[in-house]
Image (tube, rainbow, N blue to C red):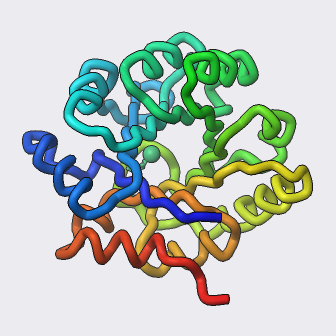
Amino acid sequence: MKNYVSASVLSADMLELKKEIKKLEISGIDMLHFDVMDGSFVDNITFGLPVLQQVRKATDMKLDVHLMINDPLRYASAFADYGADMISFHIESSSDTLATIRKIKEKGVKASVALKPATSAEEVFEFLPYLDMVLVMTVEPGFGGQDFLHGTLDKISVLRKKINELGLDIDIEVDGGINAETSVLVKRAGANVLVSGSYLFGAADMAAAADIIREDLPC
Ligand SMILES: O=C(CO)[C@@H](O)[C@H](O)COP(=O)(O)O
Ligand SMILES: [Co+2]
C-alpha cells in the first residue's frame, strides 16, 4: 500500500496559517490533518467550521478532518460541506456509527472511524465494509507533542490482518507521537497514513522529515 503523510496543523503557527499551509505544499505533504476538539470529548478546544472554510479556500491539499467531539452525527455533514475530503470520528462518542458513516459518504467524502488507545480493534470490525480508513490513536487524543504509546502497535496489526482477510482496501491512519523512529514501527504493523505534528513542524527541513516518515520499509 502507498504511504501518505498528513500534517497536523495543531502544531502550526496559527497567526501564520496561510504561510504554514504553503510550506506544507512546497514540502510535498500529502494531506492536511485538521484536529477539531470540543472541550468535552477531550480536554482541549481547538478550531472548527469557520477555520476549515478558510483553509479550504487557501489550498487544494486533501483535508483530513479528525473530529474529537461529542455527537459527531450532528456535525459530520457540516464538516463535509465546509470542505473536508475525509472525516474521522470517534467510535467512543458516536451514538450511531453506521448512520454517521452514511452521512459522510452521501456527501462524497471518505469516512473513517477513530479509536482511542483503550478501544479494541474488534469494536470497528462490523463497520469495515463501509469504511475508507480507520484511525488508530497512538496517544490519548487532546494534545499534540505527546509520546507514542507502544501498546497500540498490536491493534494496528490486528486491524491490518482483518482488513486483508476481508479483502478490503482500507487505509490505516496513525496519529500521535509519530517521528523517524515510531514511523518504522507503525508501518511494520500495517499503518500507511501517518499523521505528524510536532515532528514535522519542528524539523529544520520539513520535506526531508516527511520523506523519512513516508518511506517504504526495506523488504
Ligand atoms: O489528534 C491529535 C491529538 O489529539 C493529533 O493529530 C496531534 O496533533 C498529533 O501531534 P503530534 O503527536 O504529531 O505532535
Ligand atoms: Co488528530
Residue 79, horizontal then vertical, whole percent? 44, 21
Asked if residue 1 is positioned above or below residue 162 in the image, the reply reads below
Q: How many badges with numbers are in the image?
A: 0
| Residue drawn at point x = 13 percent, y = 41 percent | 18
Residue 28, horizontal then vertical, whole percent? 31, 62
Residue 8, horizontal then vertical, whole percent? 35, 50
Q: Quadrant of the N terminus?
A: bottom right
| Residue drawn at point x = 28 percent, y = 22 percent | 53
Relative placement, left or right, of 210 versus 40 is left
Residue 47 falls in image quadrant? top left
* Ligand 2 falls in quadrant: top left
Q: Quadrant of the C terminus?
A: bottom right
Asked if residue 46 is positioned above or below residue 153 in the image, the reply reads above
Q: Residue furthest right?
A: 165
Residue 100 falls in image quadrant? top right
Relative placement, left or right, of 202 versus 77 is left
| Residue drawn at point x = 25 percent, y = 55 percent | 24
Relative placement, left or right, of 38 versus 18 is right
Residue 206, horizontal then vertical, whole percent? 25, 69
- Viewer-proximal residue among 39 and 54: 54
Q: Residue furthest bottom?
A: 219
Relative placement, left or right, of 2 versus 28 is right
| Residue drawn at point x = 63 percent, y = 23 percent | 105
Asked if residue 60 is positioned above or below residue 30 in the image, the reply reads above
